[in-house]
Image (cartoon, rainbow, N blue to C red):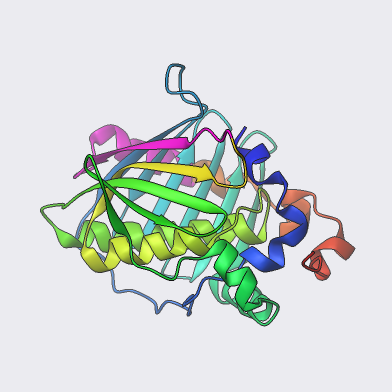
Amino acid sequence: MLRRIFKMVVCTMSVAWMALNAEAQTKPEAKGIEFRIDTDVYVDESKPPIASTKTLFLRDRVIECDDAKQRAMILEYSTQQIVLADLATHRSCRIEMASLESKLSSLKSQMTPEQVKAWASSEMPQDAGNGYEVIQSDNLRYQFKTMVPRNAELATAYSEFADWSVRVNAIYPPYKPPLLRMQLNQYLGEQRKLPIEVRLTDLRSTNATPVVARVLVQEMLSRQDQERVKNLDAVVASLKTVTDQDFFQIPAVANSKPQSAK
Protein backbone atom coordinates (compact mmCIF):
# COMPACT_ATOMS: atom_id res chain seq x y z
CA MET A 1 0.00 0.00 0.00
CA LEU A 2 2.80 2.40 0.85
CA ARG A 3 4.45 1.62 -2.47
CA ARG A 4 1.15 2.21 -4.29
CA ILE A 5 0.78 5.67 -2.74
CA PHE A 6 3.88 6.87 -4.55
CA LYS A 7 3.75 4.61 -7.61
CA MET A 8 2.31 7.39 -9.75
CA VAL A 9 5.34 9.59 -9.18
CA VAL A 10 8.11 7.11 -9.94
CA CYS A 11 8.30 8.31 -13.57
CA THR A 12 8.67 11.91 -12.35
CA MET A 13 11.24 11.39 -9.64
CA SER A 14 13.45 14.15 -11.00
CA VAL A 15 10.68 16.38 -9.66
CA ALA A 16 10.77 14.96 -6.20
CA TRP A 17 14.35 14.09 -5.43
CA MET A 18 15.68 17.44 -4.30
CA ALA A 19 14.93 19.23 -1.03
CA LEU A 20 14.98 23.01 -0.97
CA ASN A 21 18.11 23.12 1.15
CA ALA A 22 19.61 19.63 0.93
CA GLU A 23 23.22 20.70 1.39
CA ALA A 24 25.69 18.00 2.39
CA GLN A 25 25.79 17.55 6.13
CA THR A 26 29.12 17.82 7.84
CA LYS A 27 30.62 14.85 9.63
CA PRO A 28 29.30 15.02 13.21
CA GLU A 29 31.35 14.47 16.29
CA ALA A 30 30.83 11.26 18.24
CA LYS A 31 27.57 11.56 20.11
CA GLY A 32 27.41 11.37 23.87
CA ILE A 33 24.05 9.60 24.07
CA GLU A 34 22.53 6.35 22.90
CA PHE A 35 18.81 5.74 22.46
CA ARG A 36 16.21 3.85 20.42
CA ILE A 37 13.19 4.82 18.36
CA ASP A 38 10.49 2.25 17.45
CA THR A 39 8.19 3.04 14.53
CA ASP A 40 4.97 1.28 13.49
CA VAL A 41 3.33 2.16 10.16
CA TYR A 42 -0.40 1.73 9.51
CA VAL A 43 -2.55 2.08 6.42
CA ASP A 44 -5.59 1.01 8.45
CA GLU A 45 -5.44 1.96 12.12
CA SER A 46 -7.91 -0.78 13.03
CA LYS A 47 -5.46 -3.43 11.82
CA PRO A 48 -1.90 -4.39 12.79
CA PRO A 49 0.95 -2.28 11.38
CA ILE A 50 2.18 -3.09 7.88
CA ALA A 51 5.76 -2.22 8.85
CA SER A 52 7.76 -1.90 12.04
CA THR A 53 11.33 -0.74 12.57
CA LYS A 54 13.69 -0.30 15.48
CA THR A 55 16.30 2.45 15.08
CA LEU A 56 19.30 2.32 17.40
CA PHE A 57 21.23 5.56 17.80
CA LEU A 58 24.82 4.85 18.85
CA ARG A 59 27.70 7.22 19.51
CA ASP A 60 29.22 6.85 16.03
CA ARG A 61 26.43 5.39 13.88
CA VAL A 62 22.73 4.68 13.52
CA ILE A 63 21.22 1.26 12.82
CA GLU A 64 17.67 0.82 11.55
CA CYS A 65 16.38 -2.77 11.72
CA ASP A 66 13.34 -4.14 9.90
CA ASP A 67 13.01 -7.64 11.32
CA ALA A 68 10.04 -8.65 9.15
CA LYS A 69 11.89 -7.85 5.92
CA GLN A 70 15.22 -8.99 7.37
CA ARG A 71 16.83 -5.73 6.29
CA ALA A 72 18.98 -3.14 8.01
CA MET A 73 20.35 0.29 7.18
CA ILE A 74 23.48 1.50 8.94
CA LEU A 75 24.70 5.10 8.86
CA GLU A 76 28.42 5.04 9.55
CA TYR A 77 29.36 8.60 10.38
CA SER A 78 32.99 7.59 10.91
CA THR A 79 33.34 6.37 7.30
CA GLN A 80 30.67 8.66 5.83
CA GLN A 81 28.98 5.64 4.29
CA ILE A 82 25.54 4.06 4.39
CA VAL A 83 25.42 0.28 4.55
CA LEU A 84 22.30 -1.50 3.32
CA ALA A 85 22.01 -5.12 4.41
CA ASP A 86 19.60 -7.81 3.19
CA LEU A 87 19.95 -10.72 5.56
CA ALA A 88 17.52 -12.91 3.60
CA THR A 89 19.64 -12.81 0.42
CA HIS A 90 22.96 -12.51 2.28
CA ARG A 91 23.91 -9.32 0.45
CA SER A 92 24.95 -5.81 1.38
CA CYS A 93 26.00 -2.65 -0.40
CA ARG A 94 27.82 0.52 0.61
CA ILE A 95 26.79 3.98 -0.52
CA GLU A 96 29.04 6.98 -0.04
CA MET A 97 27.13 9.81 1.59
CA ALA A 98 28.90 12.28 -0.68
CA SER A 99 27.84 10.28 -3.73
CA LEU A 100 24.24 10.18 -2.57
CA GLU A 101 24.27 13.93 -2.01
CA SER A 102 25.84 14.47 -5.43
CA LYS A 103 23.07 12.51 -7.15
CA LEU A 104 20.48 14.67 -5.44
CA SER A 105 22.31 17.86 -6.37
CA SER A 106 22.59 16.82 -10.02
CA LEU A 107 18.80 16.53 -10.17
CA LYS A 108 18.10 19.94 -8.62
CA SER A 109 18.54 21.73 -11.95
CA GLN A 110 15.66 19.72 -13.43
CA MET A 111 13.15 21.27 -11.06
CA THR A 112 10.88 24.09 -12.17
CA PRO A 113 9.08 26.47 -9.79
CA GLU A 114 5.86 24.60 -10.55
CA GLN A 115 7.44 21.30 -9.60
CA VAL A 116 8.79 22.71 -6.35
CA LYS A 117 5.31 23.98 -5.52
CA ALA A 118 3.87 20.53 -6.16
CA TRP A 119 6.26 18.74 -3.82
CA ALA A 120 7.46 21.32 -1.28
CA SER A 121 5.88 23.86 1.02
CA SER A 122 6.51 27.59 0.88
CA GLU A 123 5.38 27.97 4.49
CA MET A 124 6.49 26.81 7.91
CA PRO A 125 4.37 24.16 9.67
CA GLN A 126 1.13 25.54 11.06
CA ASP A 127 -0.97 24.64 14.10
CA ALA A 128 -3.77 22.33 12.93
CA GLY A 129 -5.48 21.93 16.31
CA ASN A 130 -5.95 18.80 18.44
CA GLY A 131 -2.23 18.75 19.15
CA TYR A 132 -1.25 18.43 15.47
CA GLU A 133 0.87 20.63 13.27
CA VAL A 134 0.64 20.51 9.50
CA ILE A 135 2.91 21.16 6.53
CA GLN A 136 1.79 20.55 2.96
CA SER A 137 2.48 21.06 -0.72
CA ASP A 138 0.05 20.81 -3.60
CA ASN A 139 0.42 17.03 -3.66
CA LEU A 140 1.20 15.90 -0.11
CA ARG A 141 0.30 16.76 3.47
CA TYR A 142 2.00 15.83 6.73
CA GLN A 143 0.11 16.17 10.00
CA PHE A 144 2.25 15.43 13.02
CA LYS A 145 2.46 15.46 16.79
CA THR A 146 5.72 16.02 18.61
CA MET A 147 7.42 15.83 21.97
CA VAL A 148 10.35 17.75 23.41
CA PRO A 149 12.97 15.29 24.69
CA ARG A 150 14.86 16.00 27.88
CA ASN A 151 18.07 16.00 25.85
CA ALA A 152 17.93 18.11 22.68
CA GLU A 153 20.62 15.92 21.12
CA LEU A 154 18.01 13.22 20.56
CA ALA A 155 16.08 15.49 18.21
CA THR A 156 19.23 16.53 16.33
CA ALA A 157 20.35 12.92 15.88
CA TYR A 158 16.90 11.86 14.69
CA SER A 159 16.66 14.71 12.19
CA GLU A 160 20.06 13.81 10.69
CA PHE A 161 19.16 10.14 10.39
CA ALA A 162 15.72 10.84 8.92
CA ASP A 163 17.23 13.04 6.21
CA TRP A 164 19.69 10.35 5.09
CA SER A 165 16.92 7.76 5.14
CA VAL A 166 14.76 10.00 2.96
CA ARG A 167 17.63 10.48 0.50
CA VAL A 168 18.17 6.73 0.14
CA ASN A 169 14.46 6.11 -0.39
CA ALA A 170 14.31 8.86 -3.01
CA ILE A 171 17.28 7.79 -5.15
CA TYR A 172 16.57 4.06 -4.78
CA PRO A 173 13.34 2.04 -4.59
CA PRO A 174 10.69 2.75 -3.35
CA TYR A 175 11.43 6.20 -4.89
CA LYS A 176 9.54 8.23 -2.31
CA PRO A 177 9.19 11.99 -2.94
CA PRO A 178 11.50 13.59 -0.36
CA LEU A 179 11.10 17.36 -0.50
CA LEU A 180 8.29 17.87 1.97
CA ARG A 181 9.59 15.25 4.38
CA MET A 182 13.02 16.88 4.39
CA GLN A 183 11.39 20.19 5.24
CA LEU A 184 9.62 18.46 8.11
CA ASN A 185 12.90 16.91 9.27
CA GLN A 186 14.60 20.31 9.20
CA TYR A 187 11.80 21.83 11.26
CA LEU A 188 12.01 19.05 13.86
CA GLY A 189 15.78 19.50 14.12
CA GLU A 190 15.57 23.27 14.48
CA GLN A 191 12.78 23.05 17.07
CA ARG A 192 14.58 20.23 18.93
CA LYS A 193 11.45 18.08 18.74
CA LEU A 194 10.83 14.38 18.12
CA PRO A 195 7.76 13.13 16.26
CA ILE A 196 5.41 10.80 18.09
CA GLU A 197 2.89 10.51 15.25
CA VAL A 198 3.10 11.42 11.56
CA ARG A 199 0.15 11.21 9.16
CA LEU A 200 0.90 11.39 5.43
CA THR A 201 -1.91 12.08 2.95
CA ASP A 202 -1.64 12.01 -0.83
CA LEU A 203 -3.74 15.02 -1.83
CA ARG A 204 -4.00 13.89 -5.45
CA SER A 205 -6.53 11.25 -4.41
CA THR A 206 -10.06 12.39 -3.58
CA ASN A 207 -10.55 9.55 -1.08
CA ALA A 208 -7.02 9.37 0.29
CA THR A 209 -6.50 7.54 3.56
CA PRO A 210 -3.48 8.80 5.51
CA VAL A 211 -0.54 6.53 6.14
CA VAL A 212 0.13 6.76 9.88
CA ALA A 213 3.49 6.31 11.57
CA ARG A 214 3.49 6.02 15.36
CA VAL A 215 6.80 6.59 17.11
CA LEU A 216 7.92 5.41 20.53
CA VAL A 217 11.09 6.96 21.97
CA GLN A 218 13.27 4.96 24.36
CA GLU A 219 15.82 7.36 25.82
CA MET A 220 18.40 4.67 26.50
CA LEU A 221 19.48 1.34 25.01
CA SER A 222 18.65 -1.90 26.77
CA ARG A 223 20.91 -4.92 27.18
CA GLN A 224 18.89 -6.59 24.40
CA ASP A 225 19.63 -3.61 22.14
CA GLN A 226 23.34 -3.97 22.78
CA GLU A 227 23.15 -7.68 21.97
CA ARG A 228 21.27 -6.87 18.76
CA VAL A 229 24.08 -4.55 17.69
CA LYS A 230 26.75 -7.19 18.33
CA ASN A 231 24.83 -9.88 16.49
CA LEU A 232 24.07 -7.62 13.54
CA ASP A 233 27.70 -6.54 13.25
CA ALA A 234 28.74 -10.19 12.99
CA VAL A 235 26.07 -11.00 10.40
CA VAL A 236 26.74 -7.93 8.23
CA ALA A 237 30.46 -8.72 8.19
CA SER A 238 29.64 -12.11 6.64
CA LEU A 239 27.41 -10.77 3.84
CA LYS A 240 28.47 -10.58 0.22
CA THR A 241 29.10 -7.00 -0.85
CA VAL A 242 27.43 -6.04 -4.15
CA THR A 243 26.86 -2.83 -6.09
CA ASP A 244 23.83 -0.68 -5.40
CA GLN A 245 22.38 -1.69 -8.80
CA ASP A 246 22.67 -5.37 -7.92
CA PHE A 247 21.33 -4.81 -4.42
CA PHE A 248 18.16 -3.18 -5.74
CA GLN A 249 18.26 -5.09 -9.05
CA ILE A 250 18.20 -1.84 -11.01
CA PRO A 251 19.03 -2.08 -14.74
CA ALA A 252 22.30 -0.26 -15.41
CA VAL A 253 20.80 1.91 -18.17
CA ALA A 254 17.86 2.98 -15.99
CA ASN A 255 20.18 3.77 -13.10
CA SER A 256 22.57 5.84 -15.20
CA LYS A 257 19.96 8.17 -16.68
CA PRO A 258 16.99 9.35 -14.61
CA GLN A 259 13.66 9.58 -16.35
CA SER A 260 12.59 13.05 -17.36
CA ALA A 261 9.73 14.80 -15.64
CA LYS A 262 6.37 14.57 -17.37
Q: Tell me which corner region of the image, top left, top right, bottom left or bottom right, holds residue 243.
A: bottom right
Answer with left or right where residue 223 lies relative to residue 257.
Answer: left
Question: Which residue is at the front of the view, 236 or 80?
Answer: 80
Whether residue 100 appears in this view of the structure is: no
**Percent x, y for residue 165?**
50, 56
Answer with left or right where residue 9 lies relative to residue 153.
Answer: right
Residue for point 28% across, 68% down: 30
Magenta span includes 212:
yes
Q: Give the magenta range.
A: 207-233
Answer with left or right where residue 86 lies relative to residue 153.
Answer: right
Whether residue 85 appears in this view of the structure is: yes
Answer with left or right where residue 10 lies relative to residue 121.
Answer: right
Question: Which residue is at the front of the view, 171 or 114?
Answer: 114
Residue for point 73% across, 53% down: 10
Tell which residue pokes out farthest to the top in this image.
47
**Percent x, y for residue 63?**
42, 49
Q: Tell me which corner region of the image, top left, top right, bottom left or bottom right, holds residue 129.
A: top left
**Percent x, y for residue 261?**
77, 67
Tell which residue pokes out farthest to the left in this image.
150
Magenta span includes 20:
no
The vertical placement of 230 against 75, above or below, is above
**Percent x, y for residue 90?**
67, 40
Residue for point 57% across, 74% down: 101
Residue for point 56% across, 62% down: 119
Question: Which image quarter is the N terminus in?
Answer: top right
Q: How many marks?
A: 0
Q: Tell me which corner region of the image, top left, top right, bottom left or bottom right, holds residue 106.
A: bottom right
Question: Which image quarter is the C terminus in?
Answer: bottom right
Tell which residue pokes out farthest to the right in this image.
253
